[in-house]
Image (cartoon, rainbow, N blue to C red):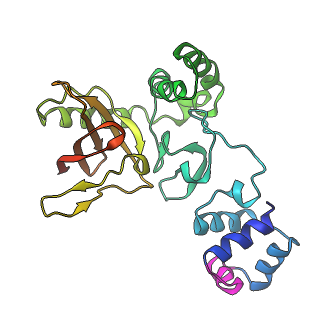
Amino acid sequence: MTTKDVIFELRTKKGMSQDELAEKVFVTRQAVSRWENGDTVPNTETLKLLSNLFDVSINTLLGSPQKLICQCCGMPLEDEIIGRNGDGTLNEDYCKWCYADGTYTYSDMDELINVCVPHMEQQGFTEEQARAYMKEMLPKLDYWKRYEELSDNGEFDAFKAQLIDEINALGIEGMPKLESLNALVGKFVNLEYPLPSGVSAKFLDDGTTYLGNQLECEFGGERCFGVLANMDFILICTYEAEGKNPELLLYKKR
């Protein structure tokens, strides 16, 4: 698709007229008409406004001329998994797992490799192949080449360590000691829990990145512990394979 087709499709999906779109991005209706006729393309600042309005990347608005990959983990980037800056705008260099709300979530390359390898095994790689591929590829990515410049001097790692201490101090029966927290996108972990009132509820935002992990129960059995947290809360649950039959054990404001 070309830029003119993309803008037309996004506008009509939103049910907006050319006048309404023009008002939201501070241009004239004639300018929008010229975009959709293919006579001109929006300038850089207007592309940023359109990106925020339609919640798509500038790359998408331009007809996807580039193959975007996360500059931390190497994952191909689609609009729905692109990370966000602190002001909520999309950052087209990173995925939601590696960059969330203006924060880089990985400072240790080996830790990132340990997280990625099981997913690559599901795609047919052996563990040895996956590790060798990641060890060769990651140092070539911009984040790791510029790590000293981009890192936060250990602030995020210190926050994760504090969270881990708080979670372990809860003393949840049967839950082993938590050793690490990984970045998890809400869409993939937002389970619906039955409440004592008889209703069911979700507690997460599908588009937000959280910290969490899955732990095997010390007593054995098929149920696992799920841990999720951020600056505002800690959530502990149990569930069966693939998140079935979830049970909320604890939801605690921090």
Look at the image and tell me in which quarter the N terminus lies.
bottom right
Q: Residue furthest right?
A: 39
Can you see residue 103?
yes
Q: Residue furthest top?
A: 128
Q: In the image, what residue occupies the spot 66% across and 25% down?
A: 140
Front residue (pair 161, 170)? 170
Front residue (pair 158, 124)? 124
- Image: magenta residue range: 15-26
The quarter of the picture where residue 129 lies is: top right
User: Does 19 appear in magenta?
Assistant: yes
Q: Is residue 105 above or below residue 7?
A: above
The image shows residue 66 at horizontal and vertical percentages of 75, 46
Is 146 positioned to the left or the right of 247 in the image? right
Is 177 positioned to the left or the right of 173 in the image? right
User: Does 248 appear in magenta?
Assistant: no
Q: Is residue 153 above or below residue 3?
A: above
The image shows residue 119 at horizontal and vertical percentages of 50, 30
Q: How many marks?
A: 0
Q: In the image, what residue occupies the spot 22% across and 42% down?
A: 236
The image shows residue 85 at horizontal and vertical percentages of 51, 52
The image shows residue 137 at horizontal and vertical percentages of 64, 23
Front residue (pair 147, 197)? 197
Q: Is residue 219 above or below residue 142?
A: above
Q: In the image, what residue occupies the spot 36% across and 32% down?
A: 157
Q: In the image, what residue occupies the spot 67% across and 77% down?
A: 12
Q: Is residue 83 above or below residue 197?
A: above
Is 2 positioned to the left or the right of 132 in the image? right
The quarter of the picture where residue 31 lies is: bottom right
Can you see residue 42?
no
